[in-house]
Amino acid sequence: MADASPPQTVDRHLDRIQLLFEGGLYRQTLDAIATALEQHPYAEPLWLWQAIATDAIGNTEAAIETVLPLTNSQDAEIRKQANYLASIWSAPRLERPQNWNARVENLDRLGDRQEFVRGKAASAPTTPSPSFTEPPRPSANDPKPFPFWRTLIFIGAATLATTILFAALNS
């Protein structure tokens, strides 16, 4: 006889969903949400996570459709979060200037070159290139630099002594 385990609580589902999402496993997050919604179809936090994970996989339109009913939730926190997400996802996309984007070359064009294996150099050089020299590291015998605060004290004392000397000479 198969032992049916009792359904998990919403909180346990949410903990698992959050771990999957934070790990970047968005499709698995959606699968976990679907399983949780089968057991708890009216749990609004699950629907909120459904919208967030749906947006994370790039389907913003479906995320908006999922979050819009939650903007009328009886739970003030769910309503607040749903309104916030809906406003972000519905906002017009701003065009970024080209100089804001970094261009990364596609390494696939290297083809069959032997010196590259899965994006890493097969025989990486052990010495730095001639165009870059590492700054020298301080040794134990190097003198310690004069602390900045001592310089300030010296300047202050010299100014005070000069002021007293001129005051004495002028009186």
Image (cartoon, grey):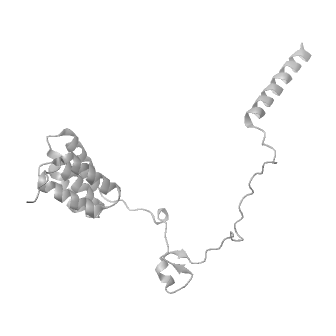
Which residue is at the front of the view, 85 or 14?
Answer: 14
Q: Residue furthest front?
A: 1
Residue in view at x 17 percent, y 50 percent: 8
Above or below: residue 88 compared with residue 129: above
Q: Where does residue 111 sit, x and y in percent of width and height? A: 49, 85
Q: Where does residue 5 sit, x and y in percent of width and height? A: 14, 53
Is residue 38 left or right of 168 when viewed as pictured?
Answer: left
Above or below: residue 135 compared with residue 10: below
Which residue is at the front of the view, 101 or 4?
Answer: 4
Q: Residue furthest right?
A: 169
Residue in view at x 50 percent, y 87 percent: 112
* Quadrant holding the C terminus: top right
Q: How many marks?
A: 0
Which residue is at the front of the view, 85 or 143?
Answer: 143
* Quadrant holding the N terminus: bottom left
Q: Where does residue 43 sit, x and y in percent of width and height? A: 15, 48
Is residue 2 left or right of 91 when viewed as pictured?
Answer: left
Residue 65 at least partly seen = no
Q: Residue furthest bottom?
A: 112
Q: Where does residue 29 sit, x and y in percent of width and height? A: 26, 59
Place residue 147 in its image quadrant: top right
Above or below: residue 171 compared with residue 42: above
Residue 94 at least partly seen = yes
Residue in view at x 17 percent, y 47 percent: 9
